[in-house]
Amino acid sequence: MRKEDVSFIRKGEGKDLVFLHGYLSSKEAFLPFLDYFSGRYRVTAFDFCGFGQSAPLTSPFSVSDYAAWTGEAFRLLGIEKPYCIAHSFGCRVAVKMQAIAPFGKEIFDKIIFTGPAGLLPRRTWKYRLKVKAYRAVKKWFPALAERKFGSEEYRSLSPVMKESYKKIVNEDLRGDIAKFSPRALVIEGTEDAVTTAAEAEEYAAILPRGGLKYIKGGHFAFAENAADFTLAAEEFFG
C-alpha cells in the first residue's frame, strides 16, 4: 500500500481528528466538519479502499481487512491516537482496529460513533424463514433471488464489492465492542431507520466506556442536524 492509494483531505494543525465514512459514502460527507474543526485540530478524512477516489479493491475485504488497511493509512499519514468521528460502516472499522491492536494499545483517544453498524440482528424464526426462502430461490433462479432479496445497496456493487459486502454485514461485532477501551460516545438520530435506536442503545451499553446521546435526524443525523452534532462533539472532546 502506498500513500498515493489513499485519497484524503487534510486541514488545520494540532491534535489529530479523523473522520471515517459510511458504506457507499466518501470523505466528502464530512466537508462542513472539516472546515469547522480545522480551527482547533488537524483534521483528516479519507476514502476507504474501494470507495471514492482511493484505490479499488482487488479482492473481497472483510472488516478486519479494512481495519488493517486503515491502520496502514494512519501510519502513512502520520496519525497516532487521534480523536475520531465514525459513521455507520466506519464504526465497524474503528471497533475492529482496536480489536486487532496489540494488547494495551489504544488506537483512539476518544471516539464518536454515529449511526453505528456492527450488531447482527437476533436470529428470529422470521429471519431463518427468509434465509431458507432465499436459498431455495437462489438455487434455481439466482438473478431473481438477487432482485427479490438483495438490498438496493447490494445490487449496485461490483462482483468483488458484493463478496466484500457479504463478509462485512455477516460479522457480528458484539465481542469486539465489549473490549473497546477508548472513551466513546454514541450519537443516534431519533429517526434513524437503518441502525435503530435499539441498536444504538445496545451499542452504548456494551461499550465499557460508552455514552449515548440522541439528536434529531435520520441515519445521516450528523449532516442533517450539524449544529446539535457539532455541539455534542465539542462537549465530548473537551
Image (spheres, rainbow, N blue to C red):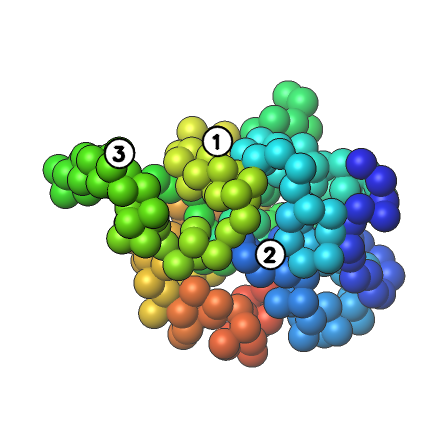
Packing grade of label 1 (10 A; few <14, some 14-19, many >=20) is: some
Q: Determine the residue positioned at 65% across, 41% down.
A: 57
**Which residue was labeled with disc 2?**
21
Location of residue 96 with respect to 110 vertically, above or below: above
Three-letter amino acid code at disc 3? Lys
Q: CA distance from mark 2 to mark 3?
A: 35 Å
Image quadrant where residue 13 sits: bottom right
Location of residue 63 with respect to 49 vertically, above or below: above
Image quadrant where residue 75 sits: top right
Between label 1 and label 3, give the one nearer the viewer: 3
Q: Dots 2 and 3: beta carbons under 8 Å?
A: no
| x, y percent for residue 37 | 73, 68
Three-letter amino acid code at disc 2? His
Three-letter amino acid code at disc 1? Asp
Q: Secondary structure at mark 1?
A: helix
Dot 2 or dot 3, earlier in sequence: 2
Q: Determine the residue positioned at 39% across, 59% down.
A: 152
